[in-house]
Image: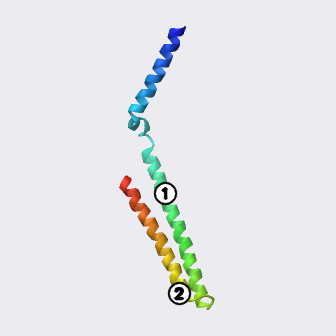
Amino acid sequence: MKKEKIMKNHHLFSKIGLGLLSPSVCMAGGLDQATTQMESIKTWAYTFLGVVVFVYLIYHVTMALADKEQWVDVAMALGKVALAGGVLVGGAWAWSIFL
């Protein structure tokens, strides 16, 4: 009885050891599917952010045309949008280094 339990544990530990020694074999199945899913999420997020930025800039331009704020505020809003876009580009560049 005790010998059977030891053999069962031996098989369990050998399977765990093989799994740890060969992670690329164990985890290779869903990488393409996950990459495709992340690309679709990124495309959706960039589209959503593009619409939000467009509405933000149109709001500031409309407020400047109605003399509710100055054109300097529109330039500041444009600068903020450009900085946010730069962060996105920088993040994509950093992400591409590791892929």
Give the total number of marks visible in the rendering: 2
x and y percent of residue 43 in the render?
Answer: 48, 61
Q: Earlier in the sequence, mark 2 or mark 1?
A: 1
Point 53% across, 87% down: residue: 72
x and y percent of residue 32 in the render?
Answer: 42, 47
Instruction: Please tell me whether mark 2 or mark 1 is closer to you in this view.
Output: 2
- 72 and 65: which is toward the camera: 72
Q: Say which residue label 1 marks.
A: 40
Q: Residues within 10 Å of mark 1 (few under 14, many from 20)?
A: few
What quarter of the picture does the N terminus occupy?
top right
Q: Vertical placement of 28 versus 39: above or below?
A: above
Is 5 left or right of 22, judged from the image as shown? right
x and y percent of residue 40 in the render?
Answer: 49, 57
Q: Amino acid at mark 1?
A: Ser
x and y percent of residue 34 in the render?
Answer: 47, 48
Q: Quadrant of residue 53?
A: bottom right
Task: Label 1, secondary structure: give it.
Answer: helix
Point 54% across, 76% down: residue: 54
Task: Label 2, secondary structure: give it.
Answer: helix
Disc number placed over residue 72 in the picture, else none: 2
- In the picture as drawn, the residue positioned furthest to the top comes out as 1
Q: Vertical placement of 45 versus 38: above or below?
A: below
Q: Amino acid at mark 2?
A: Val
Q: Vertical placement of 23 versus 65: above or below?
A: above
Point 38% across, 33% down: residue: 22
- In the picture as drawn, the residue positioned furthest to the bottom comes out as 67
Q: Residues within 10 Å of mark 2 (few under 14, many from 20)?
A: few
Q: CA distance from mark 2 to mark 1?
A: 37 Å
